[in-house]
Each structure stands twice: as structure tokens, then as C-alpha cells.
Image (spheres, rainbow, N blue to C red):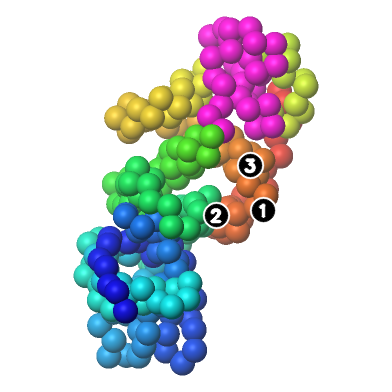
Amino acid sequence: MPTYSDEGIVLRRIDYGEADRILTVLTLEHGKIGVIARGVRKSQSRLASRTDLFTRSRMQLARGRGELDVLTQAETVAATPLRSDARRAACASLCAELTDRVLESHHADPEIYALVASALAACADPERDPRAAIVWFARRMVDRLGYAPQLLSCVSCERRLPEDVAWFSAPGGGLLCARCAPGDPEATACTVRVIKVLRAAADGDEVLWLRLRLDAATLETLERIVESELAHHLDRRLRSIDVLRAIEGRGAVRVPVD
Ligand SMILES: [Zn+2]
């Protein structure tokens, strides 16, 4: 069997047979691939910890006959120790689920790879707020899908937006002015601050993003916006969003226009 090596992040895994695992791995050079890790559930397997969820490793793989390549060796690049923190683990799951859902197999994209690696690192970093990292990540992913929102002028009347409250409409594809807002009763009211943060994210300005101090209300509005975008653009709801909501003790969000 021909072999190759690549760096990869485990997005999903299921137990298979007596001691095997089937993994969905996002690789740097080969995109998203299916991998079988044989015998990793045996206690003496050296590969076990390298097939943990969200682990980033340098992998040796052999091309399989079917859909799955075979993991033969792996060396950890960055472990993601999240098990002790349910909220961080839920944020990382959301990141992995969204990545798995959005990306096609065998389509390498180094920029996406870096984005996923950095989001998972942020979820594991005690100095970082995982929710802010997830909002950034999800926004970038939605943009990569080709749904960059319109944030400078109203998506309905095309008038330039004043420095004032505006309403984010996921079906509309961006912000609505006060006059047009009633057109989407589920649009989310955004303060000037939220709009500024959305524009920073749209510019892909991560340095500015990391410098912004997101207070609880701003972060919650941003989460609501990203969730509404994901709900609108993906055909099925992400399971990890519900898990995260449950952990944070919040129900599904339905916000009327102010
Ligand atoms: Zn308008």
C-alpha cells in the first residue's frame, strides 16, 4: 500500500469492531479524510492518545482500498486537554462539527486548517475565552462558505447605515436599517459596538479582534447572530450548539426586534 505523511486534526471518531476506531481527520495537505486506526482501543496501543478528539498530530498513513486510509504512526503536535472543562470541550466540539459539516472531503485548504487549529488551541487555552474564539471561527467559516454579510449599507434599501443601532438578518444576508428592520421579525438588534466587532471579523482582522474586549452582552448578541447564520446556511442544526446551550443554562434563543 502506498504511504504518505501529513499533519492532521481529529474532528470525529467512532469505535469500530473489537478494537478499532474510524476517524474523520482534517489534514493540512489532503483536506478532510476518513481514517481507520486499527487496534487503538487495546490498552497497550501507542496510537491511542493520538486518536483523541481534537488532537493534532503528524500522521503516517497508508492508502486503503476503500474510502478509508490506514493510520500507521502518529506523533502529537498539540494535544487538546479539554476533558476536565465541559464548556471548553463543547466549544471545541462545535468547532469540529462545523468544520466537518462545511468541508468537502479531499479538498486541501491550508487557510482553513490554520483557522481550525487556532480555534481549537484557543478552546484549550485558559487565558482565552472559548466563546469569543468560537464566534470568530464560525464567522470566518460562514464567510468562507461564500456568505459574507453586508455590513455597511442596509441589505434591503441599500442606504448607507448611520452610526446607530441596526438589525442583523441572516436570511437578508446582513444588516437592516431601522426603517427596513420590521421586514425580518427575527432580526437581531445590534449596538454600534456589535456592528464594529462584526466589521472587524468581516475584515479578517484577528489582531484587532483579539484586542477587542467583548462584554457579556456583546458576546451574547454575536453568538445569536452566528447561530442564526448557521441555522440559515446549514441544512441541519449543529448538535453541539444545543450541548453548549445546555451547559450554559440557556434555551434556544428567539429575540424579538426592540
Ligand atoms: Zn433599509
SS at badge 1: loop
Q: Position of residue 183 (x, y in %)?
A: 78, 21
In the displayed structure image, the side of residue 184 where residue 221 appears, left or right: left
Corner quadrant of residue 51: bottom left
Q: What is the chief secondary structure element of the magenta stretch?
A: loop
Which quadrant would the C terminus be assigned to in this image? Answer: top right
Q: Is residue 16 above or below residue 92?
A: below
SS at badge 2: helix
Residue 96 badge:
none
- Residue type at mark 1 is Arg
Ligand 1 closer than 8 Å to the CB at disc 1?
A: no
SS at badge 3: helix
Of callouts 2 and 3, the N-terminal one: 2
Q: Position of residue 69 (x, y in %)?
A: 39, 73
- Residue type at mark 3 is His
Residue 236 badge:
1
Read off the magenta span. 147-176
Is 182 in front, or is 40?
40
Q: Position of residue 94 (x, y in %)?
A: 50, 54
Q: Position of residue 26 (x, y in %)?
A: 39, 59
Q: Which residue is mark 3?
A: 233
Circles 1, 3 touching at the beta carbon (< 8 Å) = no
Residue 225 visible somewhere in the drawing: yes
Circles 1, 2 touching at the beta carbon (< 8 Å) = yes
Corner quadrant of residue 179: top right
Which quadrant would the N terminus be assigned to in this image? Answer: bottom left
Corner quadrant of residue 170: top right
Report, in whole angstroms, how far the alpha carbon at label 2 lies from the one at label 3.
Answer: 11 Å
Is 243 in front, or is 15?
15
Is 112 in front, or is 231?
112
- Whether 170 is among the magenta residues is yes
Report, in whole angstroms, how far the alpha carbon at label 1 lies from the one at label 3.
Answer: 9 Å
